[in-house]
Amino acid sequence: MTELNDREAELVSAHEQERPARELGGPLRLGVWILGGLLSAYSLAVVFRPVEAIQHRLTFLAVALPLVFLCYRSGLAPLVRRLLGRPEPVRAGEVPGRRVEWPSVGDWVLAAASLAVLVYPLADIDGFRERGSGAALTDLDVAAGLVLTVLLLEAVRRTVGWSFAVICVAFLLYAYYGAYLPIDWTIGHPGFDFAQIVSQLYTGTEGFFGVPMQVAASYIILFTVYGAVLDYSGASKFFIDLSFAAFRRSRAAPGRTVTTAGFLLGTVSGSGVATTVSLGSVAWPVLRRAGYPKEAAGGILAAGGIGAILSPPTLGAAAFIIAEYLGKSYLEVLLYATIPTILYYLGIFLAIEIDSRRFGTHAVAVDAPRAGRLLLRFGYHFSSLILIVVLMALNRSAFQSVVIATAVAFLLSFLDPRHRMGPRRIGRALAKGALEVLPVTAVCAAAGIIVGSITLTGLGQNLADIIVDIGAGSLVITTVMAAVAVLVLGLAVPVTASFIIAAVIIGPALFDLGVTAPEAYMFVFYYAVLSEVSPPTALSAVAAAAITGGNTYRTMMMTWRYTLPAFLVPFAFVLTPNGQALLGQGPIGTVLLMTAVSAVAVAALAMATGGLAAWPERVLAAVAAVLLLFLEPVPIVAGLAVLAVAAAMHLVRRRRRDPA
């Protein structure tokens, strides 16, 4: 994520699902940054000197979890002070306008407890592993496991809010009290005691130290370090400058520029809200001068921002979990996302083109070097991105690929005197990479409560059977229910948590109806991400509206219109036999043909949602889009015919209106 000024940081804090970290000062700030830097350095080293899985995850969490309690406020002290009528304390050395906060005694106690319960198994890792494989747990094991459970619940409450913590508690209660459910209920089970639950969550790889934790400690930390190195080496500024230089001589250029910049910034930022805010501070003045209304500009900013976690080569954290769940390389997941990404941005560009005519926007002169000159001077910033894909194509692991790309980005920084990665910048980049992964680490570890409880009780398959029964065995009804469920879930919890919960509950329901694992997981992934632009919360859209000053609800609806293809295309690769072609699976001819048909469907959607066509034309275009997305010969022909009628009606109407 690019460096944010105070106003931008305030907006991200207000609208991001992850809670803001406290502003530390003095020696403590330095100490936290050193620990963060060491955590990143350890993660980089493990790529080439592997450590046994559970030992690596324990070690990673033993550093990350205490840092969570030191870096993230509890949020309870201000409430207590307000209740008691006490003023805010002022500490010596605070920077005006930027409050320095210090961990309380309670924070230090929680950090120490976190370290203790995670170092305890490391002291006798072989014995701990043996007890997790079936031997009886000691009383100390059970106590440590219970303490870690409470600590993780508090960590996610601090970092992402109450909702996810409450969901985790509900799954724990279900595992413990399941025997009290009516015997004829499908979700009933014999019930498990504390020792059995702790054994599932704490001593194996089905709970806290399962796949989500593996992803946080291996994939995500490496990519956040890579993003931080790119940022400190000047890549973020180059991407924005290049976007403004590439499109500057047409009325649609400002909108296309913002969208392209959002895509490029996605390689540095893993947050839709943060990308929206970073982009908005630069792009909103340009969009305003071009004549865009506040709500339309906000929609473009939010749609471009959310593209940051939909697009290769980095995608969002959930994409790494998909790779682990499928047992496939991360490169394959990137390939799954390629065609949907193309269709997503095609839809935005077409909507921007329509809106440029609808709103009468105009070209804006931007003080930026020419694109060719920028590419010649700073185009090397693309090389590390390309290198990641090339190395994975040459059968290098994703871990090794991103570490090598990080080293290349570091070396290339010396080509720009202003952004040379000296010792100070290296330290900051390593620390920033680690500190940015703390909320995701807390979520991934706590998600083990949900995954472990579902595995222990068999709840996943039971809920899948219920979902299929409610949908009357219909794939269409079940898929619609799944989409709504993931969107609603995403209103309360972050994208990563939303994906994990939906994958273990909704995934099996789709599997039972014949959907393949890649199609099901990618469907869940897209809807988990799209919750950030879905009313009534639409966090990215709310952040964009705060920047432009536009009406929040209308900004949400404009964002929804720009991102509409991303909502419909996932249905195509779940509901239609040829839908797998949109994930790059199948014969190349079929993939190209289905991509072309889907592109026409996206164009029809743009016509249906744009404001230039009359209502009869828009209705016909919407029908055509739905028919085309069936991706079968007869519906495709029918869709093309309906679209041709809509286009003909539009042309005739325009000629009658403008006979010249």
Image (cartoon, rainbow, N blue to C red):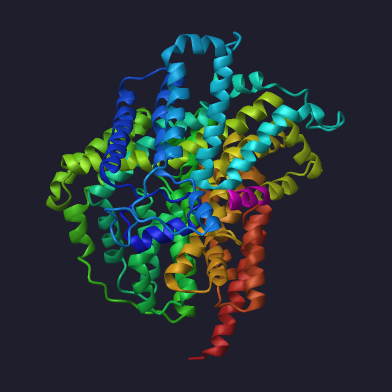
Q: Give the residue at x 30% y 74%.
A: 249
Q: Relative to 653, say whether 110 is above or below.
A: above
Q: Is residue 374 left or right of residue 531?
A: left
Query: What's the magenta bit mostly, secondary-structure-wise?
Result: helix
Query: Quick check: 387 left or right of 471?
Result: left
Task: Answer yes or no: is residue 254 visible.
Answer: yes
Residue under the point 78% across and 38% down? 466
x then y, percent, for residue 92: 28, 53
> In the image, what residue occupies the spot 46% across and 40% down?
440
Based on the displayed image, in which of its 4 quarters is residue 474 positioned? top right
Q: Nearer the viewer, residue 138 or 391?
A: 138
Check residue 617 for magenta coloring. Answer: no
* Magenta range: 484-493
Q: Along the line of sight, which residue is nearer the eye, 136 or 307?
A: 136
On the image, the x and y values in percent for residue 659 come to 52, 91
Most extreme residue toward the left is: 417
* Residue 314 can be seen in this image: no
